[in-house]
Image: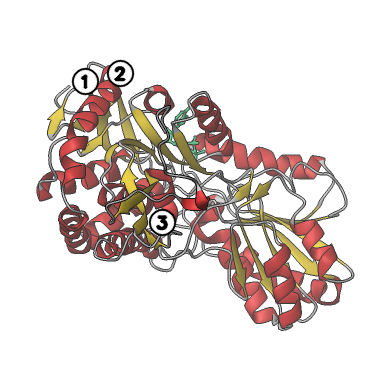
Amino acid sequence: MSDAYQHYIDGEWRDSDGDSFTSENPATGETLGRFQRATDEEPDRAVSAAETAFEEWRSLSRIDRAEYLWDIYHELRDRHEELGRAVTRECGKEISEGKADVTEAWHMVEWAAGDARHPKGDVVPSEIPAKDAYMRRKPRGVTACITPWNFPVAIPFWHMAVTLVEGNTVVWKPAEQTPLCGQIIAEMFDDVGVPDGVFNLVQGFGDTGAAMVDDDRVRTVLFTGSAEVGHQIAEAVAGDPSKRAACEMGGKNAIVVTEEADLDIAVHAAVMSSFKTTGQRCVSSERLVVHTDVYDEFKQRFVEVAEEIAVGDPLETETFMGPLIEADHVDKVSSYNDLARTEGVNVLVDRTDLPDAEVPDGHEEGHWVGPFVYEADPAEPLRCTHEEVFGPHVALLEYDGDIERAIEIHNDTDYGLAGAVISEDYRQINHYRDHAEVGLAYGNLPCIGAEVQLPFGGVKKSGNGYPSAREVIEAVTDRTAWTLNNDEDIEMAQGLSADIKTRKD
Ligand code: ADP
């Protein structure tokens, strides 16, 4: 299968006997590359390589391990333009988003590699003066990283940067929609000469991810993707108490606009949150919870922008929204738009089927969908206002009363990933901060826009840990208590007698 890109296992590019699959540009339908699809053999081989490499890798100092990451950092910076364009061509994000994806990746690498020279662990007091007590961290071993298509460069590094610096080895499976970004990243690891087996790339679909999860030699699974798959993974590892899975999943995120809000900020934040990445961020907002006093004005202004927002070629800087990722996803988003209608909502903007005139020349095969905006009664248990659509599908939900009522609507979802409050009243903002059931909360900002030095993850159905950013350390290391006696006698804590008494005493 020589015309197809290979897997990268144990420091070598390898063929497999499986079928191949292609990566397609969602804006044009153009084929970007052909890739070998893993059989059962590749995840098995990759895990073996990662297991073998582990002992040597963990025995390097954190600082030496981080040196390899610094080389990756420079590769990411040097290849920013190329990789940013690859992101946009492969997943359809507008070009500044494509480049930001790469920037976020090097920020994560910079953070992890820089952290290598910082203290790690704790010096802990002991009851016994002659004892030195510490909390130390040990790497857990082979780590499976399973990533989605929508941040095809940033998320892999959220998973892998800290994981590698801490001394674990990695088997990574990128999303089947973005194997080309996976290929370029693997080339970087190959170019910088990371020791064989420390980083492995296996290209494939869900069955390959599942095989990695089920492999007993994999000690930790880091997963970012859908709630459905995340829950399957959490269940699959639950039978083995020594195995760990940190899963970050979707959301039905909301923005609360209070009666005190600055409506310029509110509309701006809502548009960014709902339509950036064509609504395909796990933190995208599909619900806008707006106080009745400002509802009409907010609605009019938000609708005006949604009617006019520029949908088009993501490589053009004038574009705000690119295409959806694939044809099946167009079907899914369209069917939720239909469902909303069936559920009796009041549709305000419907650009589901973009007219031909709005589709840029040469992009007729793209997966185009424009904004769909409606108003619904927050008291109704509608599916369209409770289930994640993952597209530019936005509900306006009017509320009357105080911030508690807004929070009730905001929290009326099984998910708990991201949210925002727009208000000029600090008491309302603080109330939101303390009561919003989310892992990522923002005040007077969009509910998108993570930075790597903050934790990233959700609560409720949105997450069971942190496969991302700095908190990933909790998933990929075991804490150990290490206590050293500096005396010639043994003295115990809690007044426990250390005397050995025999029958002769
Ligand atoms: P999305 O809906 O964003 O595509 P998915 O959860 O379907 O999210 O996919 C995210 C990642 O999980 C992809 O790399 C995909 O191949 C992988 N995946 C899908 N199904 C499984 C599974 N059953 N076990 C492990 N990984 C899976």
Whether 503 is drawn above or below 130: the answer is above
- Disc assigned to residue 39: 2
Q: Tell me what residue is drawn at x 51 percent, y 25 percent.
A: 236
Q: Quadrant of the N terminus?
A: top left
Does mark 2 have its CB less than 8 Å from ligand 1? no
User: Which is closer to the viewer, label 2 or label 3?
Assistant: 3
Whether 400 is drawn above or below 186: the answer is below
Residue carrying label 1: 16
Residue carrying label 3: 469
Question: Is 277 on the left-hand or right-hand side of 155?
Answer: right
Q: Amino acid at mark 3?
A: Ala
> Relative to the observer, which residue lies in front, 141 or 230?
141
Q: Earlier in the sequence, mark 2 or mark 3?
A: 2
Asked if the residue under mark 1 is in contact with the one under mark 2, i.e. CB atoms within 8 Å, the reply is yes
Question: Is 86 on the left-hand or right-hand side of 230?
Answer: left
Q: Earlier in the sequence, mark 2 or mark 1?
A: 1
Q: Quadrant of residue 389?
A: top right
Residue count near mark 3 (Cα–Cα under 10 Å), binned few <14, some 14–19, many ≥20: many
> Relative to the observer, which residue lies in front, 293 or 171?
171
User: Which is closer to the viewer, label 3 or label 1?
Assistant: 3
**Colouring:** secondary structure
Q: Quadrant of residue 316?
A: bottom left
Q: Position of residue 10 (x, y in %)?
A: 16, 31
Residue 93 visible in the picture: no
